[in-house]
Amino acid sequence: MRGYKKPTVSIIGASGYSGAELTGLVLGHPSVKLEKLYAFSQAGKRVADIYPAIGSDIVYERYEGGCESDICFLALPHGEALSLVPPLVSDGRLVIDLSGDFRLKNTEEHLKFYGGKKSPEHVMPYALPELFHETVRESKAVSNPGCYATSIILGLAPLVKSPLARLENVACTAISGISGAGRTGKTELSFSEMSGNVRAYKVGAHQHTPEIMQALDTDTLNPAFGFTFTPMIAPLVRGIYTVLNVRFEEHLSVSQIRGHFREFYRSAPFVRVRDTMPEVRHVAHTNYCDVHVAAASEDGSAVIVTAIDNLVKGAAGQAVQNMNIMLGYDETLGLL
Amino acid sequence: MRGYKKPTVSIIGASGYSGAELTGLVLGHPSVKLEKLYAFSQAGKRVADIYPAIGSDIVYERYEGGCESDICFLALPHGEALSLVPPLVSDGRLVIDLSGDFRLKNTEEHLKFYGGKKSPEHVMPYALPELFHETVRESKAVSNPGCYATSIILGLAPLVKSPLARLENVACTAISGISGAGRTGKTELSFSEMSGNVRAYKVGAHQHTPEIMQALDTDTLNPAFGFTFTPMIAPLVRGIYTVLNVRFEEHLSVSQIRGHFREFYRSAPFVRVRDTMPEVRHVAHTNYCDVHVAAASEDGSAVIVTAIDNLVKGAAGQAVQNMNIMLGYDETLGLL
Amino acid sequence: MRGYKKPTVSIIGASGYSGAELTGLVLGHPSVKLEKLYAFSQAGKRVADIYPAIGSDIVYERYEGGCESDICFLALPHGEALSLVPPLVSDGRLVIDLSGDFRLKNTEEHLKFYGGKKSPEHVMPYALPELFHETVRESKAVSNPGCYATSIILGLAPLVKSPLARLENVACTAISGISGAGRTGKTELSFSEMSGNVRAYKVGAHQHTPEIMQALDTDTLNPAFGFTFTPMIAPLVRGIYTVLNVRFEEHLSVSQIRGHFREFYRSAPFVRVRDTMPEVRHVAHTNYCDVHVAAASEDGSAVIVTAIDNLVKGAAGQAVQNMNIMLGYDETLGLL
Amino acid sequence: MRGYKKPTVSIIGASGYSGAELTGLVLGHPSVKLEKLYAFSQAGKRVADIYPAIGSDIVYERYEGGCESDICFLALPHGEALSLVPPLVSDGRLVIDLSGDFRLKNTEEHLKFYGGKKSPEHVMPYALPELFHETVRESKAVSNPGCYATSIILGLAPLVKSPLARLENVACTAISGISGAGRTGKTELSFSEMSGNVRAYKVGAHQHTPEIMQALDTDTLNPAFGFTFTPMIAPLVRGIYTVLNVRFEEHLSVSQIRGHFREFYRSAPFVRVRDTMPEVRHVAHTNYCDVHVAAASEDGSAVIVTAIDNLVKGAAGQAVQNMNIMLGYDETLGLL
């Protein structure tokens, strides 16, 4: 436990959807203590004013820099964490950043997808515990994965990290709940526009694509590897439902692939390799990622389906999972 | 107009969702007259008892065989039309069957996907007017396409019927509104189970797959051609949203493909090749199929997105479009 | 037909939800011609850019005042029609205003609920055709009722205009679809906030209350009459579902009240006095108002339930109904 | 703690929505141990097969009578608990029944609303802890309140149990989430029928009405007291949103009433008397009942609004709250 008594936690950017989910999880965590919630537009209000379901009387404070707590979570819009994280790290805080600011090693690619002013030193270890558990355990500051990225990487990692056959290409479509767009008032996200609607966006141009490629390190695997990603939103609040159309150089059977996934994730408490089709409602409000090998055919194609809750395993839950690992706690503490 | 005064219409199986949609369209059609509505479980009730929004006092009659009207639509569960259609055809009625019973030429494949007792003579011309306008015009009895099949075939036909480059494979995911499952009371289709949920099903095993292959006649194009289809349901009532991950042997640009689609559909009043992303709400309650070339990359992959209303262009609307063509009317009569 | 050939129509404020609904209805109307669509923020765009389901290529023009068409509909936010209507009336146009600007005779009450700069001459006949058919027929400029007001007045009018017994008080709760809030991007109307949610608002303080009292002219009936109104929004796009808890001085039976409603509305083509419970889906996308006497008990209380589509009978459909009457057409033309 | 070590719990009828909610709460409870889950149609399946979000491998056993656990919850359809409870009570189990079987003292009224074979001895204390805390604490077998009843009684109790002024009548409308109808496959509860829909039902005839009257003991208060109840379902899964139109003999101000509610519920941890309007999303997945005095006018009318989660405070959560009290635990244990 790195000699902590009951470590204290602050959340910077606590009033958005990820911040609120994190607030609830930290309040319910048996072995850390929530100390401060920092916000910007909502500073001065109580948690219960904006999120009465959480029922906490803590008042959001305006963030002026610094943080006295042992652990600092940052749940800010992309770009805003770049300047805030370094001083917290120098102060020796454990830092878990939920934004995209510190994920990409390739600065050029970062600027292409996110813009802003990132420089090469703005990189922190990529904290997807199912792949990088050791690195997370040894880090004092990490970058929490994106929601789409989590659902896609967990569905492909076994096939890339310990390949059964050469992967030729992957065509991925993923449906996200609308909370993924954040707590915002845009006409195109209003109930009147999204009820009964489905819409794809940023086809082949989503900022999670380089993050996925980096985590999978696909270059090492297959120079000709092709990846196509089509994100969509549908009329649900939470969840990411991902369909991975995978193409191998040779035919693999469903049971071969399924067995391989089981083996690969045998020690991952939150990845459930299931024999039945995942559904969003089966993972909503949980930190699970359900994975299913849905089909495989003679021509070498296969279909992998994954489901997560974008606000939990895709954001706040995974951040707490990382905190547990960094503190030397059981990975699942406060998450089951 | 084949010498009809105002042709009369009967609908057999009028109380399901497709039958009700058809009832509304025929009632609003300027040049045909709705004569009889036949049902089974709902026989004896008035349309307005089950579908007050239609506001018609016509009473559903129990179907005992035969039909006095000039045009007979059949909107029955798969299998039930097999024995009903032949006598109607011999009686010289114009017949439009919305079921899957008469779509597949390959009896073996039909039995594999639908079961039942189809025999080789149980085949009628496949009435997708954008591809087979002439055949429909010259037929007295046709098979109306399936909803998924319509959205997928219209997104692929230009690339298959007049290829720009050799198609290597297609990975298709399609989201259907829940009305596609029909007017039924299953727990897994209840509001409580489907609100906030997404679920894939019949991956690589949906009965529309052979229908799509038959309509595209892909064998002639590329013996190694691979097609993977993942159908899903999401929390909306109407609509099919289809993402086609297409892989060509060589790179084609978005504008090349888009121009090709424009040209291919230049005389198709209901296919809109759009420069912006389709959305289900843009086609809901209409007979339009919106098509968009969303992306294309160096590796030869491209993404085509289509959207239709499963009950209109995917069923009742297309059936009326076919009726218009068979009667020598303007294709769009009563549909705009 | 007042000697018109095919009267022409313009819509001022055509790009909001009511304006769009009106656009669709006028385009489908057999006996008027849509000439111009005026908008403000959306000026320069085509209808099909914002509402592809309408599929019209008409371009929204910036409104600079004036109108050459025979009929001018105004579908603007409250307050904006005050200055625009008078010149149109002087020009001899037929004017139908969908805002609240000209509904209230009592300027003081108007200012209390709407604010702005209304003066006493800013009043036009209240065009609820089921009550004021003659007035509408003889008017050249009318005020179209509010959505809640329509659903409530139609549920109470028979009991107030030709009372069966002295009305002591009415407690009304009404659920509105979220489109009632207009085409806007507010956080509290986002899909993420409203999915799974219900919220009351403006309890006892909604601007439709004086409009309802004025239309029912309750003062003449019972000086002590009490009316309580609780509006709510729930997760649906269209519709208003109204429950009227009525209290009479004496007991009346359900059949007495139901018979009275039937008689009162015998010549109202869009009011359906039903024996079964209304549902929003039964009136969605229609101009019907379904009315049902749900219960009546010994203590003199009774429950009346009504349902309408807020965008049709509650706005655009009723406006077209009024236009039909003003033009001497059949009231239902283009609406069934 | 009545000398228990860690008391054991069994749930009879664990596979319905209330049973599943109860399963999750008991699994998360720090001071009781879940021992057995009994079901009927689902016997033999694992919890995770039907409710993967709960993620428990416990297998539902077919209930054959009896129960070895210290606490037995029954979450069965109305009528099925009548014969099962008495033997459990004689065996000295702590029994909490969630059905309506043992709520009503008046057998005649029970038979009128529920039918079946209840006899006068089939009555257990009514366990609404905010009103009957002592009774619950001293009981070994209790009847858990109905969902509508909970939301209505908590909104009226302060005005009935310690009246500020004579109550003349109450007109109540309440909107329930569709999960209130249970885990069932009825056409009228399918997503396709309920999306975009609102429907009232059992107006003035709901089985919770006598339960409410009994709990409020209104006879003692005002022989002429009138109560009208209109239940509705809307397109949400969880929650009950209740509007109480209250009429007093004299005028009371909002602040008078609000202060009175605050005082009345000062020691009720789950009732929140709020200054702002309740919303379903504010109580969803919590055991809170939010109460708000929304308006009060000169004529003596007032509007009280309450919101609960029908599956938590309206069922499983309240059952756990009652268990805590019966075990001498803190009322909120495992519920915050």
Image (spheres, coloured by chain):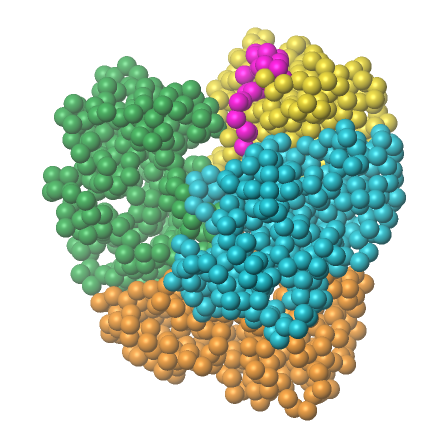
Chain colours: A orange, B green, C yellow, D cyan
Residue C294 picture location, percent across and down: 60, 26
Q: Quadrant of residue C19?
A: top right
Quadrant for residue A266, please give it: bottom left
Q: Residue at x 14, y 50 (%)?
A: B108
Above or below residue A336? Residue D216 is above
Image location of residue B313, percent across then percent down: 36, 39
* Residue farthest to the left, as pictured: B120
Whether residue A109 is in magenta: the answer is: no
Q: Is residue A201 left or right of residue C306?
A: left
- Let me know if residue A174 appears in the view: no
- In the depicted view, which residue is nearer to us: B155 or A91? A91
Q: Is residue A335 above or below residue D85?
A: below
Is any part of residue B203 visible from this angle?
Answer: yes
- Residue at the image position 41 percent from the left and 28 percent from the top: B24
Query: Which residue occupies 27% across, 56% down?
Result: B205
| Magenta stretch holds residue C263 | yes
Identity of the residue drawn at 74% across and 57% down: D134
Query: Front-most of A92 and C142?
Result: A92
Give whichever of B336, C247 is nearer the camera.
C247
Quadrant of the image for the N terminus of chain C? top right
Query: Where are the magenta residues, as a range?
Result: C256-279
Name the residue nearer the viewer: B122 or B173. Answer: B122
Residue A91, position as x, y percentages in the image = 73, 86
Circle count: 0
> Can you tell which quarter of the image residue C103 is in?
top right
Residue A10 at what x, y percent from top left?
72, 75
Q: Is D30 located above or below residue B112 in the figure? A: below
